Structures are given as structure tokens and as C-alpha cells.
């Protein structure tokens, strides 16, 4: 099995290549053997996350040099504060594509920021987290979330803070793959690991394995079920090599209730598509999700309401956007649901949204903006009853769009 390699059909490859081009363009090209070698253009790292504070202020985290920084806006992104530095000591930071700094408010006004720190070997890293006790103005020194110190993959993390203040971090981990290699036995994919903090992110209990055989390079999602139980949602490798999606509910002691298969597109591919899912749970306990898969030889972004029990199927599965839609995200407020994504139209990248006022039963579409240069993946945000799209592009910077 070849890790970190896209090997897909022509149409699916176009979707995935579009996402890569939108992040790294416009300076891509190969040197000709008849021309002198040229220095490579530095890859743009636009990976940014955003959240609203309890007071309604927009807070974003991004990479600047060897630092993660926090910026704030009191006017929905029209103007921004000076940056607050998260990590006083500079270090390597992953900030593009499926791996980017993450942000969430903890209990008692704290702000938590996570990121993956790349190590020397290709595709390796470790999960870092820094905590601010004053809402993001100053930060304690970052910690490494996991106890394992091997120079392997600990990447593509996500985290969420529960109603009880517990912080759950999940990531893709290759320690079991490395062990299988050493023992000369087969092992498909990577694994999902998680760690829990019950002191608001100051420290973490020893990490535990959620599941073997995850896909290797698709972002994970952590959210909470209707009863407050943390859940991890990721692309999984199901027998016989079908890359669909799984959900696991996690108990406070780290016990994994079960790994439930929740999508059934049956995409068989010996590679990772670099295209992770997103999940939200509404007030009635309905699990709304967006994900990318290939069905009938065509790659699409899909929306659906995921089953809660084994043996049930996805409810209301539908295609999101056109043939080149990519990297969707979603947010929910009451019965209102917003799906945001970007989509290449052959000349520029569009920011689009589907809005539902009836819990995902029907949708209306909006075109929000466009970008001619590089762009990050969009984020769907919620503030009270209002829904928003956040998008960072090379030329226009960070923008917030209210979804009326």
C-alpha cells in the first residue's frame, strides 16, 4: 500500500488536484531540461481556523513564520487586531490542506490552540497544544499531547471541548503500522488515537487507540453527541479495502464504545484522497455530515444524516455542488444547517453554500465569493442563531460571510 499518494480515476483526480492547486497556486510548474534550474516558489500555507468567542468576537489562528498567532475582529472580519503569539519559541508548524492549527474556547474563558509540528522524517509529526487563561492574549508554553515520542506520524488532529469542560483530541497515528512492519505482518492504513484532558487542557491523560486501519492523510473530526459524549469521525478502511467513514463514541475513561460504519459508498482505492469529513449534531440528536467519496466512478462531495444504530443506512444522502466541489464544512443552529465548500469553475475558485431551514430536508444555494489565486479550505461557523462562512485566500485575505 502506498501512503500519502493520490492514485484515483481521472474525474476524482481533477477534484483532488483542484484542491491542491487552489492551495498552492499560482506558482506551479516543472523546470525544462533545456532551461537552467530555478529556485522553487515557497509553498503558501494559508491553513487557518476560526471560532466565535462567547461574547461574539471572531477569533482566528494561523501560522506566521515559526509561530501560531491569534487575531481578533469585533466587526465580523472587516478589521483585525495585532497578532498574539501562541508559541513564544518558534518551531515547525503544519498549516495547509488537511492539517492546520485549530482553536476552541475552553472552560472559564480559556482559549486552546492545537497544531501539528512536523519532524525531520517525511510525513512525521507530533500534536501540540497551548492554553491561554485570559482568552487568547497570553499563552502558557505548548505541550505535546501524546506520550509516544517516536518519529512517526502523529498528524491531522482535531479537538473539541465538552459541556463538562473535558477536552478531547484525536489524530492519525502510525505506531501500529510501524510495529507491524517490524514484525513483518500486514497492516492496512494507520490508526486513530485520542487523549483526554479533564483540567481544561493543562495536561492530558495517556493516549489510547480508538481504531486500527484508518485512512492515512484525511483530517479527523471531533464533536459531541446529543448526550455530551465525545465522538470521533474519520475515513476508515473497511474490509475488503473500502474507504468509507466511521464514528466512535468515547467514554471519560478512554473506553471506546464501538466503531460504527456510517457511510456506504464502497470506494476501493489503495491510497488516501486527502479529503476528510465534517460532522455536527443538532439539538434533536441528528448527525449531519459532509464527506468526499467516489460512487460509480465519479468523485463527489456528499451530505447525509448518519445512522445512529448498526444496520441503518444514511438518510437523505445528496451530492453537494458540482463535479469539482471540494473540502466542505458545515455548521448547525436549531433547524438551520449550512454547508460551505469551494469549487473550481475552470478559471477561479468559487466559495459556495447550501442553506437548509428544515434540518437538512431541503436546501437553497448561495454563491458567496471567488478567488483567482490560492485559497484555504472554507470553515462554517455559528454564533447564536446566525450562520457564517469563513474563507482565507491569497489575495483577499481573511473574510467572513453572513449566511442569510
Image (cartoon, rainbow, N blue to C red):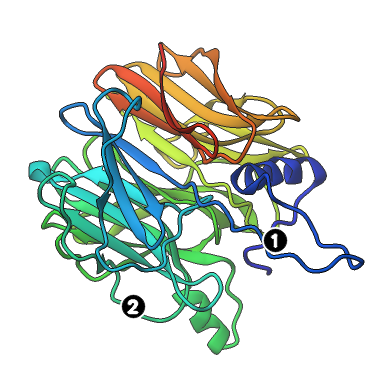
Residue reaching furthest to the left = 108
User: The N terminus lies in which quarter of the figure?
Assistant: bottom right
**Residue 9 position in % (x across, y down):** 79, 47
Residue 289 shows in this picture: no
Mark 2 to mark 1: distance in Å? Answer: 27 Å
How many residues crowd around disc 2 within 10 Å: few (fewer than 14), some, or many (20 or more)? some
Residue reaching furthest to the right = 34
Give the camera-side residue of 212 and 396. Answer: 396
Q: Residue at x 52, y 75 (%)?
A: 177
**Residue 39 position in % (x across, y down):** 69, 65
Give the foreground label among 2 and 1: 2
Tag of residue 148 = 2
Instruction: Look at mark 1 in the image and give the residue it sits on.
Output: 270
Mark 2 vs 1, N-terminal side: 2
- Left of 115 or right of it: where is 295? right
User: The C terminus lies in which quarter of the figure?
Assistant: top left
**Residue 180 position in % (x across, y down):** 53, 81
Residue reaching furthest to the front = 36
User: Considering the numbered disc 1 on the image, is that residue within a helix, a strand or a loop?
Assistant: loop
Residue 199 shows in this picture: yes
All told, the count of numbered labels is 2
- Left of 268 or right of it: where is 110? left
Above or below 116: residue 374: above
Amino acid at each position: 500500500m502506498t501512503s500519502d499518494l493520490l492514485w484515483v480515476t481521472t474525474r476524482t483526480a481533477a477534484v483532488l488536484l483542484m484542491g491542491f492547486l487552489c492551495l498552492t497556486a499560482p506558482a506551479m510548474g516543472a523546470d525544462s531540461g533545456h532551461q537552467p534550474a530555478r529556485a522553487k516558489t515557497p509553498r503558501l500555507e494559508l491553513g487557518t481556523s476560526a471560532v466565535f468567542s462567547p461574547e461574539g468576537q471572531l477569533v482566528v489562528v494561523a501560522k506566521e513564520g515559526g509561530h501560531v498567532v491569534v487575531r481578533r475582529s469585533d466587526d465580523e472580519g472587516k478589521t483585525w487586531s495585532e497578532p498574539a503569539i501562541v508559541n513564544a519559541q518558534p518551531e515547525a508548524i503544519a498549516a495547509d490542506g488537511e492539517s492546520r492549527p485549530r482553536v476552541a474556547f475552553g472552560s472559564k474563558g480559556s482559549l486552546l490552540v492545537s497544531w501539528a509540528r512536523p519532524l525531520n522524517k517525511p510525513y512525521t509529526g507530533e500534536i501540540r497544544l497551548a492554553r491561554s487563561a485570559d482568552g487568547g492574549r497570553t499563552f502558557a508554553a505548548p505541550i505535546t499531547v501524546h506520550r509516544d515520542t517516536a518519529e512517526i506520524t502523529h498528524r491531522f488532529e482535531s479537538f473539541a471541548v465538552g459541556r463538562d469542560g473535558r477536552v478531547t483530541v484525536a489524530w492519525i497515528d502510525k505506531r501500529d503500522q510501524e510495529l507491524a512492519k517490524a514484525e513483518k505482518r500486514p497492516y492496512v492504513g494507520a490508526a486513530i488515537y485520542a487523549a483526554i484532558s479533564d483540567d481544561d487542557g493543562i495536561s492530558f491523560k495517556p493516549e489510547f487507540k480508538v481504531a486500527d486501519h484508518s485512512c492515512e492523510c484525511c483530517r479527523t473530526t471531533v464533536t459531541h453527541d446529543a448526550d455530551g459524549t465525545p465522538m470521533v469521525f474519520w475515513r476508515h478502511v473497511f474490509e475488503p479495502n473500502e474507504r468509507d467513514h466511521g464514528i466512535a463514541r468515547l467514554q471519560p475513561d478512554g473506553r471506546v464504545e464501538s466503531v460504527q460504519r456510517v457511510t456506504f459508498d464502497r470506494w476501493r482505492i489503495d491510497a488516501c484522497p486527502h479529503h476528510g469529513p465534517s460532522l455536527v449534531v443538532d439539538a434533536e440528536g441528528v448527525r449531519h455530515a459532509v464527506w468526499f467519496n467516489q460512487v460509480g466512478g465519479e468523485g463527489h462531495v456528499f451530505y447525509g444524516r448518519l445512522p445512529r444504530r448498526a444496520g441503518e443506512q444514511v438518510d437523505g444522502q445528496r451530492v453537494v455542488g458540482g463535479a469539482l466541489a471540494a473540502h466542505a464544512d458545515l455548521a448547525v443552529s436549531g433547524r438551520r444547517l449550512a454547508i460551505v465548500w469551494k469549487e473550481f469553475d475552470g478559471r477561479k475558485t468559487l466559495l459556495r453554500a447550501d442553506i437548509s431551514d428544515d434540518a437538512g430536508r431541503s436546501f437553497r444555494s448561495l454563491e458567496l465569493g471567488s478567488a483567482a489565486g490560492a485559497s484555504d479550505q472554507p470553515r462554517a461557523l455559528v454564533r447564536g442563531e446566525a450562520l457564517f462562512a469563513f474563507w482565507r485566500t491569497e489575495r483577499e485575505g481573511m473574510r467572513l460571510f453572513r449566511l442569510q
